[in-house]
Image: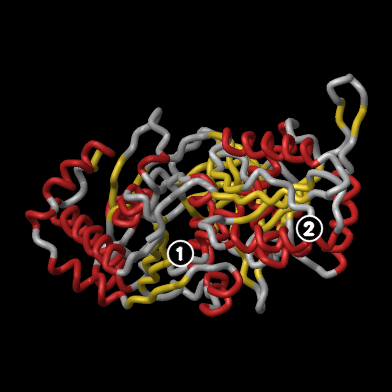
Amino acid sequence: MIVKKNPSIGILIVGHRDYPNDLGVEFAIKAANELKQRGVSVEFNSKALTSAVDASKEANSLAKKDIDGVIVFLGTWIESSTALAAIRMIEHLPFAIWGFPMFINDRGKYDSTGSLVSFAVLKGALDRVKYRYKAILGPVGDQITVEKAVSFSLAASVWNRLRQTRIGLVGYTSMSMYPGNFDHLLLRRHIGPEVVHFDIYSIIERTKKIKDVDCISLIDALNNKAKVSNRINKSDLFICIKMFLALKQIVEDHKLDAVNVKCQYELSQEFGMTACLPISLMAEEGIVAACEGDIIITTSMVIFNYFTDQKIFYGDIVDIKDNVIWLSSCGAAPFSLADRSKDVFINNFDSFFEDLRGYKKAEPSLREVNPFRGLMNSFVLKPGELTVGCLIEGVGEYKFIAVRGLGLESELRQEFFPGIEIEIQGDMDRFIDNIPSQHFTFCYGDMIDPLKDLCGILGIEFLQF
């Protein structure tokens, strides 16, 4: 299981023996301090590398440290061979090149170290041989430029963590949701996570072995998170908590960072208890948790979680009106994301179907037997600035679709189901044209630039609307 940490970036200062390397180093130190102030751990030797031999040696030493990526800082004009000698030693890691334009010196005059010129010549060389890298050009103290470096650092950290990630899959893709299917090996190779598979039998058998006494304190704690509907049988509450403890055992035994449980139809019909509440409780434990066997959306949730350290929700697009989409799940939602200005309930599917039969009692075709059973969270998610998106798996290729959004004050879907209405701040027609499935996830805040940088590192297409 991965221990969450701040990004760790190495900096290599490249220069030229005939140019003002003291100024180049001064700017590099300032850049390093800017990153540190934003929570980025920095590894570097404040020495300008002016020969290919020194650059190769220093880069090789840096690559052996626990870093997520490297910024090649162009302090002065350089010989491309010097920079490339360093890059060859760290090219297996995400890397960026950072050059800066002319500046005003101590005498109030425009001055230059030749950094921008070296940026242009090195960029041309790297593009010619198709390196994947981040190009940063701008003054060291400029906030937009610094944010580009921070964005790259975050993306490099997420890339590194994805390679170590273990996602548990209990069951398989539910109800023929083809877009949720995935190629295990391609996901591992091109995106990063390993997927560890378990049968539904495993969670059912573990659930049966949990004792009632082990659930009492958790049930008491649950009452502090939400109001438990008086229409819920106490025995159902015990089964739900036992399933959560069983799932927690699987996560701990196999050192998982995320988990997805197939609910339909083995749990929801045959066993008689959905995994909505157990999944929601797993999210509160800091484990990314999803359902319906959709590993692609689970990986998307992991990515958002790694960027923000937030609890992550996902749901179906159940409605679209103008520029507003309604994202809602069957019943799973992290309690931490609840809009506490409204009621936060734990309900059950029996109540929903009973109310539905009462509302549609004139329709004889409505089933008298509930299609599925279990407990659900009945609350809406808090409003705020969002980034909405998901990973897409094609035929041997991946893309990521993302858009900025604004979470609105919302109501329960059909008076029971959790979710949130989101105003899409982009081209809605293009968004609809590129919808890859019904499942989308989001995080709070604007993560568009780091997502774009991550896609650049992974070598996959980024679609923004």
Q: Nearer the viewer, residue 234 or 414?
A: 234
Provide the residue designation for mark 1: 165
> Residue 378 location, x and y as percent?
36, 44
What residue is at 67 percent from the left and 59 percent from the top? 455
The residue type indicated by label 2 comes to Ser
The residue type indicated by label 1 comes to Thr
Tell whether 230 sits left or right of 212.
right
> Residue 175 location, x and y as percent?
45, 73
Give the quarter of the figure containing the N terminus: bottom left
Q: Which mark is residue 420?
A: none
What residue is at 45 percent from the left and 40 percent from the top? 381
Q: Nearer the viewer, residue 455 or 421?
A: 455
What residue is at 44 percent from the left and 69 percent from the top? 293
User: Dot 2: what SS?
Assistant: loop
Gap between marks 2 and 1, in whole Å?
A: 39 Å
- Relative height, residue 51 to residue 428 (above, below): below
> Residue 252 location, x and y as percent?
28, 63
User: Dot 1: what SS?
Assistant: loop
Tell whether 28 sits left or right of 275.
right
Provide the residue designation for mark 2: 51
Tell whether 4 sits left or right of 138.
left
